[in-house]
Structures are given as structure tokens and as C-alpha cells.
């Protein structure tokens, strides 16, 4: 009995202990829950605080942006004050041709950029301010430095290229009443053949002048304003070119002038008269191009070609650009390249012409004689001493000057004579002529309005006058 009671009491005691343990665990769990809930609340408060702070920061940034905008606006206003507009009036012959608005902080070079856009891209101008200040020497300076404290400025446009005719073909027509051709065949006299435009007849002159006898078939000639110009040659000694340069007034044969000597002695070179007052001298064993100013009676080295060209064909196009076609290299091979030079630039440079060919057109191994074809094109007639000349003539078109084209001109005809001056002279609106170098007959090549080549013989002229 006693042992049974003891056992029961022991079980009750163990049971109470288990209940107590469970109660404690339950309280601990509840406390942890409450603790976690508190932590979560604290986190929520912290996050809310952070969000509140972010919102406040956002308001502060927006305020900065507004202030920043105001600062920029103020800065721009200040710039307008420190970099104001300035109106430049471009004057031509005393009258305003156009106006442009610049900033005083712009470089002077910007004035020339506008000038290039407004005026012809081919012509070169200087801008003169305050009667004597050349702005071309101030390109990198600020406009406001050159023109301080002013809102309006006048600058004069001064053309600084060569003084050229605006209509070359018409000038040639109206200013060549006589065209001369030396015969280079006499040993004791200088024989000259002259074509008179008004009568369309030839006359001959026999001139006694020892210096003129130094010229020969390797000399170069050109006609301009009824004056014949002759230069260079080899004085009948193939190894030594000469620098002699003379002019002969074809309307007064007694007027023979010895001009300044060539800077470079030349033979087999080319010359061309460029209206109104220039003679260009090209090739003949040198790359350097010489320029003779008729009015000033002065000669100087003008520019330099990329290749040495003997007996090349010179021609002026678009009243602006001088072209040099083909010719012969110093080693005796024919050239197929073309170069050109803008005569309306002060510092003249020669560049190769990248022309486009049609139907496999090629410059052939021959000489060429140029003639006006249209406002933007010319015919290059093939020329050879061979009477069986089978070389084709060329039509050269510069309507798109950046991309000229060449085509064969089969209907043009061919030249079979020595041609010291490789150009046809317009004598009226429909006719151009060229006189070859012929020893014992008078010959005339003519192009009429059909643009076909014709030749005429006048055998009695030389016999009668010589």
C-alpha cells in the first residue's frame, strides 16, 4: 500500500514538472514574438524615416535644379553682354552687297567663310577695314578684339586674283585684228605671215633683225591684241635653250620690243595670252610657270606645275581656269595627264584633273590644238606632222568642273602640220582660225559654225610678197 502511494506521487511530480517546462517555453515564445514585432515596428519606423528623408532630399534637389536653371539663365545673359552681336556689312565698290551677324568672340576667319559662301568659290578676296587694315593677316584674332565697343562694322571686299576678262571668247574676237605666224625658215631675215581679220587676207613681212634670227621651231609664240610674242628656243643649238623674249606689233611692224628675259631659258615650251594683260609661259624643261604682265612689262615666277610638260596645249575655261593638256615629258614620252590652275586666286596652285572618260576615250600620243566649242567645253584637235594622222580629236567638257568628261570628237577633223601656237583664234561669233608653220605655202585652218575643221591654201601670197 505504501509503495503504491509513493509511485503515484512520483508520477504526479514528474507531470507537474513537464507542465511547468511547457509553460515557460510558451512564455519565452510569446516574448520572442513580441520582441520581433517590436523590431519590425522599429524597422518600419526607420524605413518611414528614410523615405521621409528621401522625400525631403528630393525637394532639396528640385530646389537646386531651379537655382541651377536661374544661374544658367543669368550666365547666358552675361554672355550676351560679354559676347554681343556685331553686324558686318560687306562693301563692294562702295555699296553694301550683303550683311551678316557675328559674335564678338568669333574669329576673323569666320568673315572669310561667309565671303566664300556668298561670292564665287573660285575668286579670292581680301577684306579691308578702317581703310587700310587687311583682315587676311588677322584670321585667328577675335572680331571683338579688332572692332571693340561697336555694333556695326563696314569692311571692303577687295578682289586679289588676276585682272581677267569676264568673257574671254568675246575679248579674243574683238581685240585681235591681226594674227601673226613666223615661218622660221630664212637664214638672213625673219619672215612673218600676218592674217588681217577685217580683209581676211594675208600679208608677209621680211624683217632684218639679228636677234629675231635666234628663234626657231623650238621657240614658242602667242598672239594677243594684235601683238605677236615670241620666246625661247635653242638658237639652232639643241643643247642650249635661250631666254630671249620679244614682242612685235603686227599693226606697225617697225615696233619690235625686247622684253624682260625669261627667268628660265626654255625650248619646246608653250605660251598663251590671257585677257586682259597676261602671258603665261609653261614647260620647256621646267616645272616653274612664268607670268608676264603686259602693262607693267614685268615677268616673274608665278607657280609650279606637278609635271614638266613640253609643247603642252594651254586653254582658258570658264573665264577662270587655265588648263594644261598632255604634252611631252623630258624623256620624250607623250603625257595623258591634265593639270589646271585657278587664276582668280592670289597664290595660284596647279592640280591634276580627275576626268571621266566615255566609251574608253583616251588622250593619244599626239599634240592637240584647242578651240572653243561651247561655254563649258572645248575641242582638242589632234595634230601631227604625219600626213596620215589617224589620231582622234577630243571633246573636253567642264560643265561639272569637279568631274570633267572627255569623249572622242570624230567629226572634227585632224591637223597635219607643225603648230607652234596650239590654239584657234576666234575672229567672229562663228569662225575661229589657226595658222600652221609652213615653209613655202600659206595655209589656214578654219572652224566655222558647223564646228568642223577646214583648211585652205593660198600659195600665191608667199610668192608675191617674199
Image (cartoon, grey):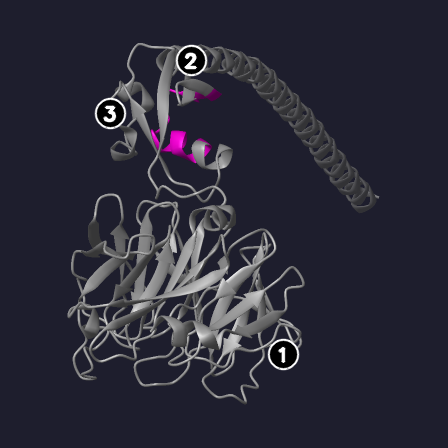
Q: Which residue was labeled with disc 1?
A: 360
Give the mark toward the camera: 2 or 3. Answer: 3
Residue 100 visible at all: no
Give the mark toward the camera: 1 or 2. Answer: 1
- Dot 3: element: strand
Residues at badges 1 and 2 in contact (C-beta under 8 Å)? Answer: no
Q: Residue furthest front?
A: 464
Residue 54 sits inside the magenta stretch? no
Q: Which residues are magenta?
A: 97-114
* Image side of residue 416 versus residue 373, left or right: left
Separation of marks 1 and 3 at Cα, in angstroms: 53 Å
Residue at x 39% of width, y 18% of height = 94
Where is residue 403 shown, x and y percent of the image? 56, 60
Residue at x 55% of width, y 83% of height = 391
The circle drawn on residue 133 is: 3
Residue at x 28% of width, y 72% of height = 219
Where is residue 158 shown, x and y percent of the image? 35, 31
* Image side of residue 14 versus residue 461, left or right: right
- Dot 1: element: loop
Residue 231 visible at all: yes
For disc 1, the neighbor class at 10 Å (few under 14, some 14 to 19, many from 20) is few
Residue 105 sits inside the magenta stretch? yes
* Image side of residue 215 versus residue 18, left or right: left
Residue nearer the viewer, 196 or 261: 196
**Would you place residue 335 above or below residue 374 in this image?**
below
Q: Which residue was labeled with disc 2?
A: 80
Q: Quadrant of the N terminus?
A: top right
Q: Name which of mark 2 and mark 3 comes first in the sequence.
A: 2
Tally the marks. Answer: 3
Amino acid at each position: 500500500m505504501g509503495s503504491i502511494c509513493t509511485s503515484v506521487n512520483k508520477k504526479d511530480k514528474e507531470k507537474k514538472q513537464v507542465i511547468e517546462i511547457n509553460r515557460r517555453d510558451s512564455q519565452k515564445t510569446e516574448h520572442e514574438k513580441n520582441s520581433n514585432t517590436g523590431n519590425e515596428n522599429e524597422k518600419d519606423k526607420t524605413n518611414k524615416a528614410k523615405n521621409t528623408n528621401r522625400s525631403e532630399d528630393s525637394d532639396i534637389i528640385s530646389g537646386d535644379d531651379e537655382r541651377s536653371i536661374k544661374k544658367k539663365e543669368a550666365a547666358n545673359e552675361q554672355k550676351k553682354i560679354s559676347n554681343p552681336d556685331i553686324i558686318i556689312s560687306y562693301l563692294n565698290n562702295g555699296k553694301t552687297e550683303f550683311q551678316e551677324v557675328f559674335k564678338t568672340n568669333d574669329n576673323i576667319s569666320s568673315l572669310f567663310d561667309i565671303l566664300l559662301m556668298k561670292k564665287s568659290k573660285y575668286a579670292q578676296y581680301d577684306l579691308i577695314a578702317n581703310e587700310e587694315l587687311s583682315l587676311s593677316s588677322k584670321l585667328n584674332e577675335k572680331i571683338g578684339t579688332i572692332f571693340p565697343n561697336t555694333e556695326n562694322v563696314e569692311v571692303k571686299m577687295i578682289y586679289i586674283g588676276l585682272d581677267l576678262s569676264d568673257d574671254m571668247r568675246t575679248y579674243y574676237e574683238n581685240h585681235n585684228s591681226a594674227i601673226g605666224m613666223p615661218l622660221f625658215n630664212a637664214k638672213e631675215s625673219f619672215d612673218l605671215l600676218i592674217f588681217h581679220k577685217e580683209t581676211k587676207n594675208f600679208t608677209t613681212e621680211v624683217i632684218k633683225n639679228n636677234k629675231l634670227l635666234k628663234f626657231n621651231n623650238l621657240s614658242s609664240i602667242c598672239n594677243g591684241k594684235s601683238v605677236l610674242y615670241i620666246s625661247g628656243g635653242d638658237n639652232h643649238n639643241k643643247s642650249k635653250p635661250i631666254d630671249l623674249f620679244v614682242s612685235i606689233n603686227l599693226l606697225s611692224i617697225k615696233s619690235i620690243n625686247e622684253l624682260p628675259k625669261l627667268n628660265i631659258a626654255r625650248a619646246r615650251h608653250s605660251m598663251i595670252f590671257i585677257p586682259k594683260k597676261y602671258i603665261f609661259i609653261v614647260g620647256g624643261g621646267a616645272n616653274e610657270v612664268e607670268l608676264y604682265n603686259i602693262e607693267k612689262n614685268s615677268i616673274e615666277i608665278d607657280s609650279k606645275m606637278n609635271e614638266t610638260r613640253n609643247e603642252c596645249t594651254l586653254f582658258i575655261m570658264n573665264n577662270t581656269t587655265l588648263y594644261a593638256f598632255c604634252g611631252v615629258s623630258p624623256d620624250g614620252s607623250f603625257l595623258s595627264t591634265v593639270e589646271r590652275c585657278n587664276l582668280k586666286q592670289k597664290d595660284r596652285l596647279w592640280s591634276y584633273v580627275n576626268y571621266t572618260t566615255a566609251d574608253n576615250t583616251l588622250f593619244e600620243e599626239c599634240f592637240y590644238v584647242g578651240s572653243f566649242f561651247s561655254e563649258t567645253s572645248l575641242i582638242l584637235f589632234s595634230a601631227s606632222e604625219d600626213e596620215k594622222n589617224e589620231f582622234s580629236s577630243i571633246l573636253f567638257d567642264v560643265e561639272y568642273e569637279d568631274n570633267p568628261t572627255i569623249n572622242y570628237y570624230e567629226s572634227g577633223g585632224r591637223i597635219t602640220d607643225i603648230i607652234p601656237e596650239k590654239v584657234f583664234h576666234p575672229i567672229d561669233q562663228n569662225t575661229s582660225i589657226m595658222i600652221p608653220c609652213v615653209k613655202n605655202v600659206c595655209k589656214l585652218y578654219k572652224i566655222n559654225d558647223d564646228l568642223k575643221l577646214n583648211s585652205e591654201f593660198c600659195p600665191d601670197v608667199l610668192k608675191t610678197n617674199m
